[in-house]
Amino acid sequence: MFHAAGPGPEVPGPEVTVRRLRRSDDAAVQALVDACGASVLDVLASGEQPRDALLVRLAVPLDADPESKRAWGVERAGRLVGLMEGLMHHPGPGECLIRAFALHPRVRGHGLATSAARFMLAQARHRGITSVEVLYRHTDLAQRSVLRSLGFLLDESPDEDRSDPSPPGFRSARLALR
């Protein structure tokens, strides 16, 4: 059973908990970032900024309200195995921008990303979000597969045809919540 630490809808899936990350999670987040490769945080950093656990909890774009920042941990058997970072009601009311979503390499390939994403979409819907945008690495076939299975529309246009502000190497996928 998939459940959250706190009120909200339940979504079937592996025995996993999704909860807000805390300062006390920084070491576990850093271990997860190290296992996944620091590039999972590229979208949160600019230039030579270090790719570390603090970005997950603290990095907010200049045009965003710091109160919109959300960082969630995905736990299995009490161990942090994934993270999601996003901005609620950004860039506008009813919109959500997910900038980072990573799972430990050992737990990939078993539907956990899809289950966690379904759970988070149900949470977003429950909180009045009507549109979700996810930044994804366009070369990552697994990310693209998960997003497509959830109904996201992926931007797969060639670089020379793109005018959106996504960081280099990333594309935007969108989903309208009903």
Image (tube, helix red, strand yellow):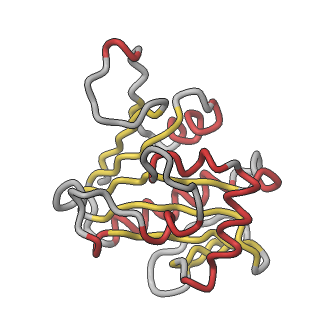
| Residue 144 percent coordinates (x, y) | 55, 34
Can you tell which quarter of the image residue 26 is in? Answer: bottom right
Q: Please, which residue is most extreme toward the front here? A: 48
Can you tell which quarter of the image residue 167 is in? Answer: top left
Q: Residue at x 64, y 50 (%)?
A: 38
Residue 97 in the figure: left or right of residue 141:
left
| Residue 116 percent coordinates (x, y) | 58, 61
Q: Nearer the viewer, residue 104 or 7?
A: 104
Q: Please, which residue is most extreme toward the right here? A: 106
Q: Residue at x 62, y 54 (%)?
A: 102
Residue 73 in the figure: left or right of residue 70:
right
Q: Residue at x 51, y 46 (%)?
A: 42
Q: Residue at x 56, y 67 (%)?
A: 11
Vertical arrangement, residue 10 with respect to residue 176, above or below: below
Residue 30 in the figure: left or right of residue 83:
right
Vertical arrangement, residue 117 with respect to residue 158, above or below: below
- How many numbered marks, from 0 up? 0
Placement of the C terminus among the 4 image quadrants? bottom left
Placement of the N terminus among the 4 image quadrants? bottom right
Q: Nearer the viewer, residue 30 or 17?
A: 30
Vertical arrangement, residue 63 with respect to residue 143, above or below: below
